[in-house]
Amino acid sequence: MERYKSQIAMIEIDGQKKIKNSSVLIVGLGGLGCPVALQLALAGIGTLGIMDDDVVNLTNLHRQILYNEGDISKNKVEIATKNLTKFNSNININSYYERLNEKNCIHLIKKYDYIIDASDNFQTKYLLNDACFFEKKPLISGSVFQFEGRLMTFMNNHKENLCLRCIQPFVNTNTQSCSDGGIIGMVTGIIGSMQAMEIIKLILERGENSINTLTQFNALNNTIKKFKLHKDENCELCGNNPTLKNVKMMNMNCTKNDIELILKMDDFLKNPYEYCVVDVRTKEERIMDGIIDGDFWLQLDLLYQNPQELEKFQDKNIVIYCHAGVRSLAATQFLKENGFKKVQSLDGGIKLYNSKKFTQN
Ligand SMILES: [Zn+2]
């Protein structure tokens, strides 16, 4: 207990025992998973499950703090287990050198009290969301994009609480990951630490968690904003008449509902002037990747705060875009919920737009 003296000063021996008696499964041992694992190991968590099917790569080293140059090409869970044990030999570590799938997920999740989503792909995120919903396990989800990070805690213990599917419809292959937009190590470090803190608060039953709330951190101006999110009563997983009854790995194809929300790039390019184009990216991204001529700029956080900014365009077809189509889809969903009828998300975002423009020229 001596090593935890400083934290026991706040949480008392009882709190430290609660941490010791808890178990956490971390899915993904990359930029987010490394700081989560390290923080929880140092805090004295009883059992840590770590899962990843990847090996260490040179381009991981700027943010994945459990690995060094000598670890390149070695498997992540093995190196992480070795290093975490050096940091704290009093914790149990279970390592899983495999990918989460529909066969192993329920069995694994059952063994742990809390689950961390530190994955970088949508298939895993939705699988975890569904599995944690069925098993009623708290899921702490983190994600990063460029200078911004996001945090959400899905409790899965009460029908008032929302799940990932309530706020973000499943998206297709062109929009599966934001990691190609760039990631900075300090942001993954901060969001990973915030995910670990969410767990400690849940264990100690102290403070407030990011439940039914999106917590968004912007590293460029040091702001943390919180957005209240609403449960979708028609959610296919947690809504009133759910259609999803068991876990299934999602195909990277659009569901019928999403297709209506998405405007194909080719369709847009046939008649771009028919649309009122809205960019939800940051100023830095606009400078870096360019814009679609004649667009209206309303950054995502401002859109969430003031959707009425777009009311003047209500009679036109509004098309929202971002880097790759992930944030614009979330914005489109949000606007639909707020009474906008003619709004769609531009598939593939500025990335696809630029590549099409380039090939056309
Ligand atoms: Zn839901």
Image (cartoon, rainbow, N blue to C red):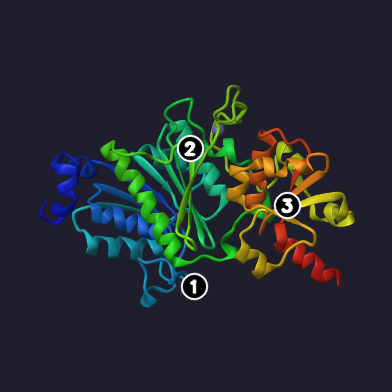
The percent position of residue 96, horizontal first and vertical second, equals 39, 53
For marks 3 and 2, give the one nearer the viewer: 3
Q: Name the residue under label 2.
A: 131
Give whichever of 128, 6 is nearer the camera: 6
Mark 1: secondary structure = helix
Q: In which quarter of the image is residue 146?
A: bottom right
The percent position of residue 293, horizontal first and vertical second, equals 79, 62
Could you tell which of marks 1 and 3 lies nearer the N-terminus? 1
Three-letter code for the amino acid on which mark 1 is drawn: Thr
Q: What is the spatial separation of the Cα atoms under label 1 and label 2, in whole angstroms?
A: 31 Å
Give whichever of 311, 53 is nearer the camera: 311
Could you tell which of marks 1 and 2 lies nearer the N-terminus? 1
Q: Is residue 87 visible?
A: yes
Mark 2: secondary structure = helix
Three-letter code for the amino acid on which mark 3 is drawn: Val
Number of the label disc, if any, that sits on residue 59: 1
The image shows a total of numbered marks equal to 3
Give whichever of 290, 203 is nearer the camera: 290
Q: In this view, does 284 lie above or below 263?
A: below
Q: What is the spatial separation of the Cα atoms under label 3 and label 2, in whole angstroms?
A: 35 Å
Tell me the residue at 48%/37% (across/down). Answer: 131
Task: Give the left or right position of residue 292, taking residue 214 as reference.
Answer: right
Number of the label disc, if any, that sits on residue 278: 3
Residue lying farthest top?
A: 240
Three-letter code for the amino acid on which mark 2 is drawn: Ala
Q: Does the residue labelled 3 lie within 8 Å of ligand 1?
A: no
Q: What is the spatial separation of the Cα atoms under label 1 and label 3, in whole angstroms?
A: 33 Å
Quadrant holding ligand 1? top right
